[in-house]
Amino acid sequence: MIDRQEDTDVLVIGGGTAGFGAAVAAGRKGLGVILLEATSKIGGVMAFCPGMPWGGGFPTDRIIGGLFEELTARLETMDPPAAEKRPCTLENFGPEIIYDHDIATLTMFEMLQEAGVRTRLSATAIAPVMNRSSIETVECYDRNGPFRIRAKIVIDCSGDGDISAKAGVPYTLGDASGNMMAVTISFHMIGVDWNKAFAEPDPYFSKYAEQGISEGRLHPDLAKLYLMKGFHKGTVFCNSVHVRGVDGTDPVAVGNATQEGRRRCHALAQFLRSDVPGFEGAHMSLVSPTVGVRETRKLEGIHRVSGEDLARGTKFADGIVSCDNPIDDVMRADSGMTHDAAITKGSYYTIPFRALVPAQVSNLMFAGRIISADSVAFASVRGMPQCMAMGQATGTAAALVLRDGGSVQSLAHELLVAELTKQGINRLGNTTSS
């Protein structure tokens, strides 16, 4: 029996960058907002892979704006600074933001509080209760047992889309064959001599990786050791350990992959200390508490973003954020990885709001990596800055819908684009397609 109920204007499910954007945007519009996060920390991949750079925030070297720009500016202007813009060492990636993980997450909490958001950690959304074509309440659970939340608008930013799927929104898993991108365990090496470690230009440390694999000291999938300078001097962020064939919607598979990933991280850290110059006196730290999942469900929206949309540089009438990220595909059916350009150099595309709206459920939107997209487009649109902007768009849309009435499907896109432009989101409204 459920005897606890909370009422709110907007329920945001998932506290990653998309959920953060949705909750802050809705709260700043004066709405009552509950942000429900199943773990003990906001940030999503920021929490699961501490120190993961914010890549893709500068299409053709101009910031996307909005909450991402505000958060970045808050960190950059601290004394001492807690973030900085750096070029990415990989081909086809633009500049990225490197930041102090703990200060960044603290600042995000503060922005949520300033917006009046009620943040509920360690609380899980279990199932929607439907009233015809709308979600009436969402059944939830925390350590005190079951409770329900009655919300006028539900925004699913969970990363897996559980509530949307249970509400009847169609979805696909992975690519056309059902293969999902590999999950990742990251870590830092502390006490690295940067001058020695990065004396050679190869960002993948390929000759060392080949040696470690040939000697049986590294897993065969570690042919590319992506090591990058962390935010603090002497730290190196290791985004190298990927575990393939994991269904991110299966908690048992995620747990097993986490343990396997930690074993590979430990082996890699030992190898770096013994074989790679500059790492001799370093030690491993900040190992991911669980795997970072790149891909599970992709929900079916009114529009499905395609690789063709990207290649054409489509700037949708309802575009809510710009992007020029490459096709960053990571180990689906095999150990292959790509980061091929998605678009002609110097160009960008926009992500349409319709890709965040289901065809049927009248008070539901979704944002983040559950966006409606084919596998090619998904590999480009999934960057954290874009996810934050998607969330900002849905939170803003919620305010417009509740102000004017009607469903999320009937929202006038020009009103949303105009409001997002006022909020500082750049490069909207330059339409080449509807």
Image (cartoon, grey):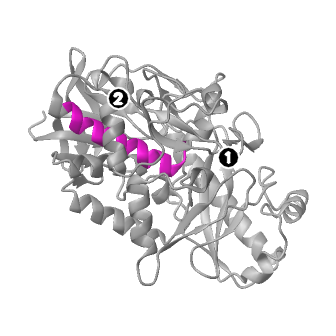
Q: Image point 45% across, 40% down: which residue?
A: 428
Q: Toward the viewer: 362 or 150?
A: 362
Q: Is residue 425 left or right of residue 201?
A: left
Q: Position of residue 238 (x, y in %)?
A: 66, 64
Residue 359: quarter of image: top left
Query: Label 2 vs label 1: CA separation?
Result: 27 Å
Rendered view: 296 above or below 65? above
Is residue 7 in view from this perspective? yes
Q: As drawn, is 389 to the left or to the right of 219? A: left
The residue that disc 1 covers is 346
- Specify whether residue 139 is in view: no
Question: In the rendered view of the protein, which quadrant contains the N terminus?
Answer: top left
Asked if the magenta segment contains residue 384, the reply would be: yes
Task: Give the quadrant of residue 376.
Answer: top right
- Does the stretch in magenta take in 5? no
| Residue 208 spot, x, y in % from top left | 86, 65
Q: Amino acid at mark 2?
A: His
Bounds of the magenta segment? 382-401
Tally of numbered discs: 2
As helix, strand or loop, the secondary structure at mark 2 comes to helix
Q: Residues within 10 Å of mark 1 (few under 14, many from 20)?
A: few
Q: For mark 2, what is the residue?
A: 413
Q: Main secondary structure of the magenta part?
A: helix
